[in-house]
Amino acid sequence: MPGDNLYCSLDVNLQEFAEQAAKKVMKAKNAKNVRIIMMNPKNGEIYAMVNEPEFDLNKPYEIAEKGTFSEKKKQDLLNNMWRNSCISDTYEPGSTFKIVTATSALEAGVVKKTDTFHCPGYKMVEDRRIRCHKTTGHGTETFVQGVQNSCNPVFIEVGARLGTPTFYSYIKKLGILEKTGVDVPGEAVAIMHQQKNVGAVELATMSFGQSFQLSPLRLLTSVSAVINGGTLITPHFGIQLESADKTVVEKLSYPEKKGIVSEKTSEDMKVILESVVSEGSGGKAAVTGYRVGAKTGTSEKLPRSSKKYIASTLGFAPADDPELIAVVLIDEPEGIYYGGQIAAPVISELLSDALPYLVK
Ligand SMILES: [Zn+2]
């Protein structure tokens, strides 16, 4: 009704924390842009969403680029500036997607946590030699250590055990091929191989998060289902409509799908992802006094020859019963570009600010 107010999930304090953290790392790494989302993984309420550089809401028609532009060019520049890249743009997730592969493998029963693997620094797939990021190899490791080490050969093997039809069935179940249904327009859909075109090499690269793209919000929403006990939630901003005198006119509700993964797999994944922080490559996401789960990622942008990267980390806390999930993407950082080195500390910073405030 005209005059009603929409009560929104964005939290001024958390939004402020996220904006400060994004500005700080963008400057320190001289990055092209920084994206951050903070969400409640249990119900999909979006607490904060940042696309830095943001435009000034008071001067929405002021273009940062200098020069005189044609009307069309000007409109393109404005549209680009107004774009909500957390929702409307896709990227190659890299190793953060190993959460999806590991979840699928545990759920399908093709791997046990104690299964052992061997990484000599690469794995042959057909005639291709696919390297691990640790070129000297991780040696013998369990599945859990493979996740902690973010070891590509372990994930290639796990992907092969799953096989394309089973892997795709979990990718579908986790909602990856669909929009999240977030209550704002312009959502991008994942760019994924058609299942029939997936050979051994495509399956291998997909298993460690390469050769396809999705939006940051899509990844965050699917991982929420992994860590919340198996419910695929709809991320959203709108909470309720209130009349001018603050009476609730309508509480908004959003679709949920339960049983996406089993409670057991969800518990296992929380423990494994917590160990990525306590013992593995996500150590810099740690927060004193809190249990944190995380997975880092470093994606090489296309074309690979450009040597440009997106450093990212996805984290959640408290690890045993998550109240908050967050993702940070740093686009084209200069100097050190590894997610575990530069994005994980941002997750630590965000959680340090947010948890005392959020978890009473
Ligand atoms: Zn390895």
Image (tube, rainbow, N blue to C red):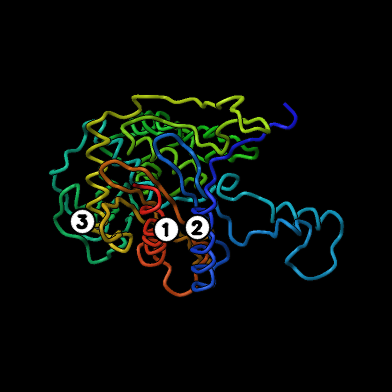
How far, Cα to Cα, is label 3 from label 1? 34 Å
Q: Amino acid at mark 2?
A: Ala
116 lies left or right of 121: left
On residue 18, the disc is 2
Identify the residue position indicated by label 1 in the image.
350
Q: Quadrant of residue 225?
A: top left
83 lies left or right of 295: right
Residue 326 at x, y = what percent? 42, 50
Labels 2 and 3 touching (C-beta < 8 A): no
On residue 71, the disc is none
Quadrant assignment for the N terminus: top right
Foreground label between 3 and 1 = 1
- Label 3 lies in ligand 1 vicinity (Cβ under 8 Å): yes
Q: Amino acid at mark 1?
A: Leu
Q: Looking at the image, which residue is at 44% across and 39% down?
A: 221
Labels 3 and 1 touching (C-beta < 8 A): no
Identify the residue position indicated by label 3 in the image.
119
Q: Looking at the image, which residue is at 38% across and 64% down?
A: 345
Residue 219 at x, y = what percent? 45, 43
Q: Determine the secondary structure under disc 1.
A: helix
Q: Looking at the image, which residue is at 22% across and 52% down?
A: 275
How far, Cα to Cα, is label 2 from label 3? 38 Å
How far, Cα to Cα, is label 2 from label 1? 7 Å
- Taking depth in this image into account, of 43 and 52 the one nearest to the observer is 43
| Earlier-in-chain disc, 3 versus 1 | 3
Residue 22 at x, y = what percent? 51, 62
Q: Amino acid at mark 3?
A: Cys
Q: How many marks?
A: 3
- Label 1 lies in ligand 1 vicinity (Cβ under 8 Å): no
| Earlier-in-chain disc, 2 versus 3 | 2
Labels 2 and 1 touching (C-beta < 8 A): yes
- Taking depth in this image into account, of 148 and 122 the one nearest to the observer is 148
